[in-house]
Image: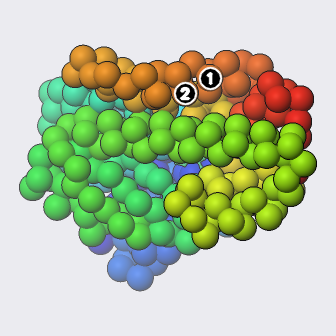
């Protein structure tokens, strides 16, 4: 019978908090929700049986989940909530955050007796709605095991290392997403320019070694349809490729492909627009080639 709180009811937060509420309904727990613009919290409570809470009330929660755009936003919320927190609370941050921030946030919260785990997620809005997200957990093993059973929105949860490791893995994962999108988009634009049917090319690639989530799912459903549904912002992807590059620099690594794709993704976010869906970066590839991918 735990009280959990979920802060940040955005594209991911709404279905993630709903999954927690479905679980709570079966075990006598309750889920408090908070959002910067509070009307979203009231709407969530009405639709999913959660309870809209004030910052003071959030202090009662044994488990606090956050899913905000950046670690800087999480810092801001920690600042607002800090004085209301109770010792023993566990803060599980599902933001795609920065490893350096995770260390600072953990140290800051430990001063209040609150443990911080980085727990970014993958699987998109569809994965969150289906409660099938992949969670990458960073923190001490014992603390990770203590929360594993509470992750009602997860289909898979993997302890990837100590504090910050979850954020590092997430950033590299999303850098690979960007690499795959860019490379597939370039290849398909060139093929289209040469008169090849893109649907036929994808049919072959998806039965061959060049396939990826970009070619199997994202490009057919979002690019070829010209819908580019805005479920994961291009600005957020550029933030992630930037974090991945910081991860490279932190170990003085050599990753020229990731560096190139970070620069391209940042340029696309500026030129196409940060609030466009991440797949809309292919609009820039199309401009560069004077060729629509269709
Ligand atoms: P959205 O932009 O849809 O939602 C952002 C949420 O954060 C909103 O609730 C917003 O509140 C809140 N917020 C923003 N800034 C602040 C702040 N300074 N203080 C308090 N609240 C704030 O983001 P997503 O749900 O798409 O993404 C959230 C995180 O999850 C990001 O780190 C993203 O990279 C990651 N992610 C996203 C995926 C996706 O498919 N969308 C998939 C996997 C990870 P308000 O409503 O008041 O503006």
In the displayed image of the protein, which residue is found farthest to the bottom?
26
* Mark pair 2, 1: CA separation: 5 Å
Q: Quadrant of the N terminus?
A: bottom left
- Number of other residues with Cα within 10 Å of mark 1, as a class: few under 14, some 14 to 19, many 20 or more: many
Assign a secondary structure to mark 2: helix
Q: Is residue 214 left or right of residue 146?
A: right
Which residue is located at x 86 percent, y 43 percent? 194
Viewer can see residue 45: no
Residue 239, given in percent of the width and then of the height, sits at 53, 27
Q: Is residue 29 above or below residue 236?
A: below
Which residue is located at x 27 percent, y 59 percent? 158
Q: Which residue is mark 1?
A: 264
The label on residue 159 is none
Q: Residue 105 or 243: which is nearer the viewer?
A: 243
Q: Residue 162 or 149: which is nearer the viewer?
A: 162
Assign a secondary structure to mark 1: helix
Q: Is residue 52 above or below residue 114?
A: below
Dividing the image into four quarters, tell me where ligand 1 lies.
Answer: top right
In the displayed image of the protein, which residue is found farthest to the front?
194
Q: Which residue is mark 2?
A: 261
Residue 62, given in percent of the width and then of the height, sits at 27, 54
Residue 133, given in percent of the width and then of the height, sits at 46, 62
Marks 2 and 1: CB-CB under 8 Å?
Answer: yes
Residue 44, given in percent of the width and then of the height, sits at 64, 58
Colour basis: rainbow
Q: Is residue 186 above or below residue 290?
A: below
């Amino acid at each position: 019978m735990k009280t959990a709180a979920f802060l940040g009811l955005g594209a991911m937060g709404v279905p993630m908090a709903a999954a927690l509420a479905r679980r709570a309904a079966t075990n006598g727990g309750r889920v408090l929700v908070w959002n910067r613009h509070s009307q979203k919290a009231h709407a969530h409570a009405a639709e999913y049986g959660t309870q809209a809470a004030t910052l003071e009330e959030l202090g009662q929660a044994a488990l606090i989940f956050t899913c905000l755009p950046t670690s800087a936003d999480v810092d801001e919320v920690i600042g607002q909530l800090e004085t209301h927190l109770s010792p023993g609370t566990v803060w599980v941050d599902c933001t795609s955050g920065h490893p350096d921030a995770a260390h600072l946030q953990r140290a800051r919260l430990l001063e209040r007796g609150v443990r911080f785990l980085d727990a970014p997620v993958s699987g998109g809005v569809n994965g969150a709605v289906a409660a099938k997200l992949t969670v990458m957990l960073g923190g001490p093993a014992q603390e990770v095991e203590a929360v594993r059973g509470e992750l009602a929105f997860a289909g898979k949860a993997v302890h990837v290392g100590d504090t910050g490791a979850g954020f590092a893995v997430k950033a590299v994962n999303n850098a690979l997403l960007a690499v795959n999108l860019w490379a597939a988009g370039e290849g398909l634009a060139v093929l289209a320019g040469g008169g090849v049917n893109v649907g036929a090319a994808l049919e072959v690639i998806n039965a061959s070694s060049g396939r990826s989530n970009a070619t199997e799912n994202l490009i057919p459903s979002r690019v070829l349809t010209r819908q580019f549904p805005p479920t994961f912002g291009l600005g957020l992807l550029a933030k992630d490729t930037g974090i991945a590059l910081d991860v490279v620099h932190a170990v003085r690594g050599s990753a020229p492909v990731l560096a190139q794709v970070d620069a391209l993704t940042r340029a696309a976010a500026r030129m196409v627009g940060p609030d466009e869906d991440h797949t809309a970066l292919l609009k820039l590839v199309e401009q560069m080639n004077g060729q629509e991918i269709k």
